[in-house]
Image (tube, rainbow, N blue to C red):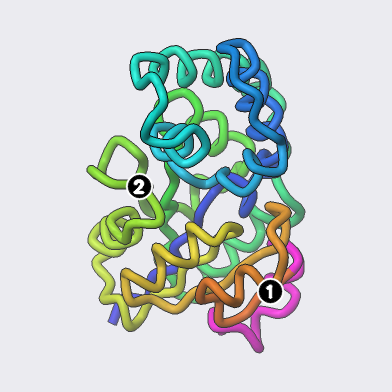
């Protein structure tokens, strides 16, 4: 039976969450919205439309959504050539590949952003497929991104593990029926990840790799 190791990317394999916080904060500021950075941080991991709705509410001027998304994309795009991978992100994926896991990415990123993230990870040889924002109607915390990743891997939910850094990841994984592993590298507290459904929590990819034999990915 195929085993799938499904990974979120931002904050899980690449150290980008705080770049997203800063660039979303600036996008909101440019359009006249004062949104605290701590609130933006808690919303990172949602797709752009859901993040805006989560932070500004349903009573917002929805005509501004495309302007906000474009501003964030332009601001964040300035970092595409220097996105920093988290420690041992690539080696972790290669180790899992060598251990017989089918590695699939499940991310709300797409297009040039996704290409930049994959360049940062530098482990395309270990990545079997990617479920991006372009492939599903609903993003996390809906289960569709994880379910699509399982379809790409050809693996059932009972033989899959989803690794992510946000409560949105954990909720999506639980709703998809897979075991969930959290990492602290996105800045979300351990207790929040556990409450959202994480079976185990590690500091970052390097910590997970060092603890692999005793982890849900053993």
Find residue 104 and report its image quarter.
bottom left
When the figure is inspected, residue 125 is found, relative to residue 31, above or below; the finding is below
In this image, 36 relative to 131: left or right? right
- Could you tell me how many numbered marks the image carries? 2
**Mark 1, residue position:** 191
What residue lies at 41% left-to-right and 25% top-to-bottom? 60
What residue lies at 60% left-to-right and 20% top-to-bottom? 33
Measure the C-alpha gap from mark 2 to mark 1.
23 Å
The image shows residue 192 at horizontal and vertical percentages of 63, 69
Q: Nearer the viewer, residue 151 or 19?
A: 19
Is disc 1 surrounded by few (<14), some (14 to 19) or many (20+) residues within 10 Å? few
When the figure is inspected, residue 66 is found, relative to residue 173, above or below; the finding is above
**Mark 2, residue position:** 139
Q: Which residues are magenta?
A: 203-218
> Which element carries disc 2, helix, strand or loop?
loop
In this image, 73 relative to 88: left or right? left
Is disc 2 surrounded by few (<14), some (14 to 19) or many (20+) residues within 10 Å? many
């Amino acid at each position: 039976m195929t085993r799938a190791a499904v990974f979120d990317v931002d904050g899980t394999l690449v150290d980008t969450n705080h770049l997203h916080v800063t660039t979303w904060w600036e996008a909101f500021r440019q359009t006249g919205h004062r949104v605290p950075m701590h609130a933006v941080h808690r919303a990172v991991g949602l797709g752009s439309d859901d993040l805006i709705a989560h932070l500004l509410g349903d009573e917002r001027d929805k005509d501004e959504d495309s302007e906000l998304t474009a501003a964030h994309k332009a601001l964040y795009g300035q970092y595409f050539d220097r996105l920093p991978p988290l420690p041992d992100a690539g080696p972790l994926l290669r180790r899992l590949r060598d251990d017989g896991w089918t590695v699939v990415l499940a991310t709300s990123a797409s297009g040039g952003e996704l290409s930049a993230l994959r360049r940062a990870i530098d482990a395309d040889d270990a990545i079997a497929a990617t479920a991006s924002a372009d492939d599903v109607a609903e993003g996390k915390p809906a289960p569709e991104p994880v379910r699509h990743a399982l379809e790409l891997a050809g693996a059932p939910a009972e033989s899959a593990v989803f690794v992510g850094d946000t409560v949105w990841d954990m909720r999506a994984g639980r709703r998809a029926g897979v075991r969930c592993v959290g990492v602290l590298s996105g800045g979300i507290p351990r207790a929040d990840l556990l409450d959202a459904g994480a079976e185990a929590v590690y500091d970052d990819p390097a910590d997970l790799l060092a603890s692999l034999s005793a982890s849900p990915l053993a």
